[in-house]
Image (spheres, rainbow, N blue to C red):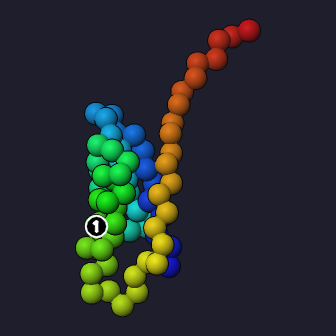
Amino acid sequence: MELIFEIRDAEEGGFYARALGHGIFTEAESWDELRNNVLEAVSLHFEGAAIRPRLVQMHYVKDELIPVEAA
């Protein structure tokens, strides 16, 4: 099983991550800290579960609004 996290920039700085299809959410100030927090959250969420994810994908999504002026 592969677990996918959607990563976005937090408004106050840093990042937040949420697992698609699971109630797992975490945040951090740096990418390395986020990576560690994601692995810890996954470990806690699936503690004692018969089926655990073998891979975690961190999918970074960056929204950008670009104004288009009328020609």
Residue linked to disc 1: 40
The percent coordinates of residue 5 (x first, y second) are 44, 59
Of the residues shown, which amino acid type is indicated by label 1? Glu
* Depth check, front residue: 33 or 69: 33
Residue at screen point 58% across, 23% down: 66
Residue at screen point 29% across, 48% down: 28
Q: Which residue sits furthest bottom?
A: 50
Is residue 41 visible in this depiction of the protein? yes
Secondary structure beneath disc 1? helix
Q: Label 1 neighbourhood size at 10 Å, few (<14), some (14-19), many (20+)?
A: few
Residue 28 lies left or right of residue 56; in this view the side is left
Q: Quadrant of the C terminus?
A: top right
Q: Is residue 8 above or below residue 17?
A: above
Is residue 23 visible in this depiction of the protein? no
Residue at screen point 33% across, 70% down: 42
The percent coordinates of residue 45 (x first, y second) are 29, 73
Q: Which residue sits furthest top?
A: 71
Residue 22 lies left or right of residue 65; in this view the side is left
Q: How many marks?
A: 1
Q: Is residue 59 above or below residue 53?
A: above
* Depth check, front residue: 20 or 62: 62
Residue at screen point 31% across, 35% down: 13
The quarter of the displayed image where residue 65 is located: top right
Q: Which residue sits furthest front?
A: 32
Q: Is residue 11 above or below residue 29?
A: above
* Depth check, front residue: 12 or 23: 12
Q: Is residue 10 above or below residue 70?
A: below
